[in-house]
Image: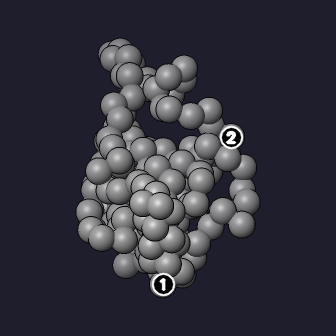
Amino acid sequence: MTTNNDVQFIEIPKIKDRRGNLSVVEGDTIPFESKRVYYLYDVPGGSRRGGHCHMEQQEFLIALSGSFDVVLKDGKSKKVMTLNKPNIGLLIVDGIWRELENFSSGAVCLVMSSAVFDEADYIRNYKDFKLFKNRRTKTKVS
């Protein structure tokens, strides 16, 4: 069963150059092959994004510009992680509830996913998420 301890920051290699830095996500930078890439931007002040859990999909989030907080819940604990550097990403494993908040002005959040969009992989109601985690716990114990 996944917990907030399985979520981790991953440093993306940075090539420094006087003309500007370059970071690349390739090879084994992240532990999955990216099947979908999307980004969030122009998020109005005070707005939240996310508010769901993936049953199987993993995601890697990067603050390309600005900053935002990622609120993580594993059914037992809550953790808030701030993304604010374009060469540091956050790996969110399956089975973790996530919400994005506190977007700075001009923030851009890039998301790389381990799977293409599949609505059946989403849990969008927190009560359903808690039931999902309880079922997983009982399955692992049996």
Q: Mark yes or no: residue 43 visible.
A: no
The residue at 33%/17% (across/down) is 16
Q: Nearer the viewer, residue 97 or 43?
A: 97
* In this picture, residue 23 sits left or right of residue 122: left
**Sooner in the amino-acid sequence: mark 2 or mark 1:** 2
Q: Nearer the viewer, residue 90 or 2?
A: 2
User: Percent from the top left, x then y, of residue 58?
Assistant: 54, 48
Which amino acid does the dot numbered 1 rest on?
Lys
Question: Residue 15 is drawn in which quadrant?
Answer: top left
User: Percent from the top left, x then y, of residue 11?
Assistant: 33, 31
Q: Which quadrant, please, contains the N terminus?
A: bottom left
Is residue 17 depicted above or below 20 in this figure? Answer: above
Q: Nearer the viewer, residue 58 or 49?
A: 58
Question: Residue 68 is drawn in which quadrant?
Answer: bottom left
Which amino acid does the dot numbered 2 rest on?
Lys
Is residue 40 depicted above or below 59 in this figure? Answer: below
The residue at 72%/56% (across/down) is 117
**Discs 2/1, front:** 1
Q: Are marks 2 and 1 in contact (CB under 8 Å)?
A: no
Is residue 60 depicted above or below 100 in this figure? Answer: above
User: Percent from the top left, x then y, of residue 140?
Assistant: 46, 57
Q: Which mark is residue 127?
A: 1
- Decide: few, some or many residues near mark 2? Use Cα within 10 Å; few <14, some 14-19, many ≥20: few
Extreme-bottom residue of the structure: 127
Alpha-carbon span between mark 2 and mark 1: 29 Å
The residue at 58%/60% (across/down) is 55
Q: Nearer the viewer, residue 136 or 69?
A: 136
Q: Mark yes or no: residue 85 visible.
A: yes
Which residue is denoted by mark 2 in the rendering?
A: 35
Q: Secondary structure at mark 1?
A: helix
Extreme-front residue of the structure: 142
